[in-house]
Image (cartoon, grey):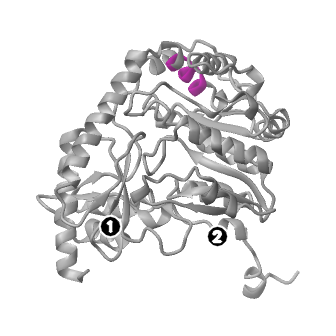
Amino acid sequence: MKSQGPKEANRMKFSSKCEACSLSPIRKFHPYVVAAEAAGRRVLHLNIGQPDVETPKAFFDAVRDFDSSVLAYAPAGGVEAYVDAVRDYYRSFGVSLEADDILATFGGSEALQLAAACILDDGDEVLIPEPFYPNYDTFIGVAGGKIVPIPTTAEEGYRFARREKIEPLITPRTKAVMITNPGNPTGAVLTHEEQRLLLDICKEHGLFLISDEVYREIIYSGKKLSSLLEFQDGAENVIVTDSISKRFSSCGARVGALISKNRHFMELAMKICQGRLCAATLDQIGAAALYRTMTPEYLRSVRDEYGRRKDALVAALSKLPGVTHSSPEGAFYVMATLPVDDAEKLQYFLLQEFEDRGETVMYAPGEGFYGTPGKGKNEVRIAYVTNPAELTRAIELLGLGIEAYNRKYGK
């Protein structure tokens, strides 16, 4: 039999959907961090939403106390203790859920992937306010969909819940509006009236409303917890994704939830859940313990800690010439505009060429947070997830790095 030659081998094709996806602007610089650290430099991280707040001990105790002789598959929809704990958590702020309204997932990310897979066909569109979490583009793209950005501006506080902004973008291919509340990367928080308007628009146009609510507790106004699931008339339209990652500083556990009262949507999602068997059994047991031991005092202490970090970061940024930034109402991110030609080029410079007293800094370049070509080129997302002293030093390094970059390459 004739062996396959180079021409035949070159005929192998990969998924055009996956080829069209980009590397994460939050994680793609990791090899350069490794090289910088190998060269003896300390890198201060402003790029990733990985808090250093201590994970509650209840998670580790629950895993340690697991006494079964076999670590078995969990049910496809989730461990009963975890599903019940999620129901009780939502009940604590007035949202009543049935067990069938909840599916345990590998973090909020898988919940978003499931939502996209269940509602999108090739060429379908999802309206998302920009700037947005870049992985939305991957989740929607591999499902065959396309993001249609809803433009916002820092000057308007990134507000987008207006008919005149949304309705002109709706086409026959529009399937959903997707939001993050509180916002990543903007820190914007939707009012009750804005949530009501978004639901009304989606109901009128037969659209799903996907609400990523993983930062729910981190709101600096002290308002009560809220969810789009509170709207009783939104049962057919609303899909919520949630996670323990930010709420309990437990990103590595990878436990989330996909929640909807739309029965057919949940039946479709269950097909995929059964296909991937289950979310991790032990992590769900640990997650259930986190919810069972959660107190208002704990949530308040976490929110207050992020408030202190926000204040330290904003104070440090205000000292940098030519830098403008958002004023976050929630979550733990700031979008900042820098006085440079290209924030990604600056990032390479900071990791490869710059240091001050053996230290440098990294962030997430802003262009990857936009769907509109050319936007965000001199913007960055900053995550304030470390202590105030380290944040202050990181911003000092950023300012020194900007000066050095502009001296060398010119703005």
The image shows residue 59 at horizontal and vertical percentages of: 48, 21
Q: Secondary structure at mark 1?
A: helix
The image shows residue 180 at horizontal and vertical percentages of: 55, 45
Instruction: Say left or right for 308 vs 202.
Output: left
Instruction: Say left or right for 191 vs 48.
Output: right
Q: Secondary structure at mark 2?
A: loop
Question: Distance of mark 1 from mark 2, alpha carbons?
Answer: 23 Å
Above or below — where is 8 with respect to 197?
A: below
The image shows residue 205 at horizontal and vertical percentages of: 78, 51
Q: At 78% from the left edge and 83% from the top edge, which residue is drawn?
A: 8
Quadrant where the N terminus sits is: bottom right
The disc label shown at residue 20, or none: 2
Q: At 77% from the left edge and 81% from the top edge, which residue is drawn?
A: 11
10 and 114: which is toward the camera: 114
255 and 159: which is toward the camera: 159
The overriding secondary structure of the stretch rendered in magenta is: helix
The disc label shown at residue 347, or none: 1
Above or below — where is 117 with respect to 73?
A: below
In the figure, residue 241 lies in which quadrant?
top right
The disc label shown at residue 269, or none: none
Confirm whether residue 114 shows in the render. no
Quadrant where the C terminus sits is: bottom left
In the image, the segment drawn in magenta is 282-290
Above or below — where is 399 with respect to 50?
A: below
Instruction: Say left or right for 252 vs 118.
Output: left
Which amino acid type corresponds to the residue marked 1 in the rendered image?
Answer: Gln
